[in-house]
Amino acid sequence: MIFSRITLLNSSTPRLVCKQLALLWILSISVIQPLHAEENTVVVPAPPETGTDTGLEPANLCIPTPADTNIIPQKPSDNKIHLQADSANLSEKDITTFNGDVVIEQNDLRLSSDQAIYNKTEQDINATGNAKLTKGSLNLTGDSIQMNLNTNLGSVQNATYHDTKSRAQGQAKNIAIKSKTELEMNKATYTTCNGPAPDWELSATTLNLNNETHQGSANNVVIRFKSVPFLYLPYLRFPIGDERLSGFLFPSFGLSDKNGTELYAPYYWNIHPQMDATITPHFIEKRGTQLKSEFRYMTKEINGQFYYDYLANDAITQTDRQLFSWQHNHDPVGGWSGNLDINYVSDQFYLDDFGGNLETASQTSIERRADIRYDAENWLFSARAQGFQTLIANEQTKRLPQLNFNTRQTIQPNELNTAFQSELTRFSHSTQKPIGDRLVLQPSVSLPLSNAAAYATFLGSVHYTQYNLDRVEINEKEDPSRSVPLFSIDSGVFFERDSSFNNKQYLHTLEPRLQYLYIPYREQSSLPVFDSAVISSDINQLFSANRFSGADRINDANQITYGLTSRYISLDSGAEVLTASLGQTYKFENSRVTLAGTPVRTETWSDLQLDVSFQPFLGLKVDGTLIRNQDTREIDQRNVRLQYKPDSKHILNINYRFQRDILETREVSAAWQVHPQWVLLARKHEDLRQDRELEYVYGVQYDSCCWGLRFVKRRYYTDAYPTDPYQEAFFIEFELKGLSSFGQKKQIDSLLNRGILGYSN
């Protein structure tokens, strides 16, 4: 029986169509899912050294292919089978043949071919002639598609595949459907590049994809770039989708003056969906072989990582060298939270020679800290244990422990408010005298009065300090104490008016501020100094009650501080186009409290301070600070920073810093896209006072839709080696997007993110 054109839609279809429905269901499971894995729930970040995101929008470089834009009209999501063909022949025994534009659809699945033959006895189906299967973002084509419904085995001959979501595509002589979740390809290729001549391509004798284990493997792998083979691997394992898989990552290498040629061979261990590790043998030409390890963990409430690096018998220093670092964070649960930061290096030059993962460490000391915290609605408790490993400078005082209890009520305007702050700290030091305990109690009461145009805040408090000391000198007290009252009135007024310039409308404000502060003098020279230092002066510090950090010194004051701020705010965008602040303090009495080695300043007027921020248009911002010495009438400090960033592809920073008799530096950095695929990278940091370069970095970055390349060279000054203070290093990263990267991705990311403000990777 011959039908000129048939359409079968529902459950009343003949038995033949029911068999075809079963076939399509098997195809949807066994062909589609291994290449389009479901979204997993892994919470540990992806393995290191894979992928690159420069923040310069390389995705815009991907031009959609016809397969990307060929959107097939979808049938309603009714789970029904929709079958169309020009004709159907049912004449032969147990065999039915569909001919001409055969189309089978169910939800987002579409199978089309010139002909489809169904064998009822053998339960075989064979679709031939321009056979194509589409499901979701995946497209499969081949000369023919065969499937046995009893064994769930099948194959696709002379197949091509393309996933529009991941941009993965390739060809295979044969795709064997081994089970509902496993595919095996013979003479297969893989790439994420567009077009028939991809920039890079992986080819393998056999390629196996198992969606049940989320693993892929390949034999006799050859990776080609620009049709030139550059890497052969007899065997390669890799994860499917976002699933992690244990195995070796691609090696990387580097070159520097200190260490010579370096080679990294990382091994990734997928311990658990919330836990992984990376173990990296690191060959260093001038020193030996170092073993680097990284362990990471993450759950709903906790996360952390620790690192351990070990180099036995450094060929240069003839010593064993090592680093240990552990960071742990516990998110709030029932009000409690905490974190841990433990770091150790074997010697003072370790960070100079090898760098490391101690992002917050300085070159003079390494912090070790443990914190716990409890947040309630109206109060806060925290505890800290803090110590330091000294590298170059003198030993720092430890806090073992420090306990804080503070109230945290919301300040109510036009009402009387009370607050309380307290601290109990045990200070420890191997040699310093004295050491011991310090108790700080600071109750306060305030009355903030305000309306839309003005405010005035009256504040009164008492700062009480009690010590319990060990190792005191003869004739010194073991339990000295100090009680200092404080009174202040802080007031301000807001004036505003409409203004226009160059046919643009602005809101112009004038905000004068006046503060009176009174703190009586208390003799404090006999008290120890555990954590106090003079705070660097800025416009905000002028209105601070204490010019010392910590609690060992409380300055005396009888003074008035004035400030004047003016803003131009765009009425179109709401942005502050221009902000300028001026401030100065007038002292009725000279301050007498000081630290050892710091002279008492006797001038009536403090230094004049000026801050300016100018943003004439989006993308350009200039910030400046000026401090004029009231006695000498000279500029003691000036800082200017300019950033031009019209978009994420163009960044230019200029920073100038000057402090009289201390420093004068200039820094210029840039990440500038000169072509849709090319970005120039540069940074230069100079010490103008010493007439020397501190660091320069320059490089180039190339990005296409499917591969990227970065070259970076660095030269920097370090006083760790006085006879040869300048060190040079060369970094390279080559990435095949969708596969992996080769080179020193982490080192380049850290160098550029730190050195070029606004650059993100």
Image (cartoon, rainbow, N blue to C red):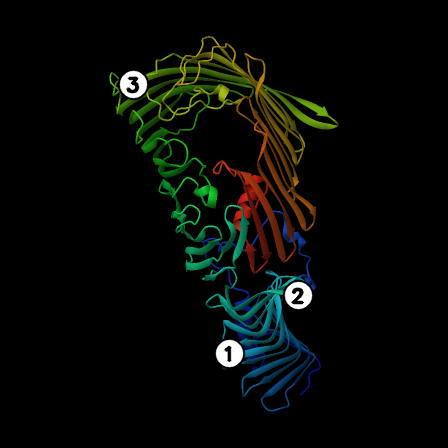
> 289 or 457, which is in the foreground?
289
Q: Establish if 103 lies above or below 412.
A: below
In the rendering, at what x and y percent does residue 29 appear? 52, 71
Q: Nearer the viewer, mark 1 or mark 3?
A: 3
Say the numbered circle drawn on residue 152.
1
Q: CA distance from mark 1 to mark 3?
A: 85 Å
**Which residue is denoted by mark 3 in the rendering?**
481
Do callouts 1 and 2 mark residues in contact (Cβ within 8 Å)? no
Q: Mark 1 or mark 3, which has the lower sequence index? A: 1
Q: Callout 1: helix, strand or loop?
A: loop
- The type of residue carrying mark 2 is Ser
Q: CA distance from mark 1 to mark 2?
A: 37 Å
Q: CA distance from mark 3 to mark 2?
A: 80 Å
Q: Callout 2: helix, strand or loop?
A: loop
Say the numbered circle drawn on residue 420.
none
In the rendering, at what x and y percent does residue 618 appear? 66, 35
In the rendering, at what x and y percent does residue 519 appear? 40, 14
Q: Establish if 141 lies above or below 62.
A: below
| Residue found at the very far top of the displayed protein | 588
The residue at 32%/17% (across/down) is 526
Residue 486's image quarter?
top left
Q: Callout 3: helix, strand or loop?
A: strand
Q: Give the crowd class for mark 3: few <14, some 14-19, many >=20 residues within 10 Å.
A: some
> 199 or 158, which is in the foreground?
199
Q: Is residue 500 left or right of residue 211?
A: right
Q: Mark 3 or mark 2, which has the lower sequence index? A: 2
- Residue 655 visible, this angle: yes
Q: Is residue 413 left or right of residue 608?
A: left
**Which residue is denoted by mark 2 in the rendering?**
227
- The type of residue carrying mark 1 is Asn
- The type of residue carrying mark 3 is Ser
